[in-house]
Amino acid sequence: MLKHYYRLVYWKRRIGRALGSGRRGPRRRPPRLAPHLQPFLVFGALVAIAVAASALAGAGYDDFGWARP
């Protein structure tokens, strides 16, 4: 049984290295945007959500809010 476990670990490592996910060398972090831009992006996303919700809520009215005849 132990032989099968070691064989499984061997092939798992070999496939991982072939796909480039081996644990050789230091880990690389994914690139991030500049930290000082993150609050502006969050604010922009919130504004975009508010504008979209407002547009969906006001879709039944004309430009001046008057009822259509």
Image (cartoon, rainbow, N blue to C red):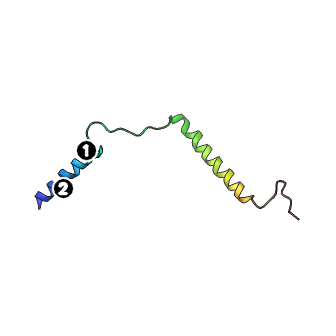
Q: Nearer the viewer, residue 12 or 49?
A: 12
Q: Secondary structure at mark 2?
A: helix
Horizontal and vertical percent position of residue 15 = 24, 49
Residue 49 bears which disc, if any?
Answer: none
Position of residue 51 relative to residue 23, above or below, is below
Q: Nearer the viewer, residue 18 or 42?
A: 18
Residue reaching furthest right?
69
The residue at the point 71 percent across, 55 percent down is 55
Separation of marks 1 and 2 at Cα, in angstroms: 14 Å
| Residue type (three-letter) at the residue carrying disc 2 | Leu
Mark 1 = which residue?
Answer: 17
Horizontal and vertical percent position of residue 3 = 11, 57
> In terms of image quadrants, where is residue 18?
top left
In the displayed structure image, the side of residue 47 where residue 33 appears, left or right? left
Q: Secondary structure at mark 1?
A: helix
Mark 2 = which residue?
Answer: 8
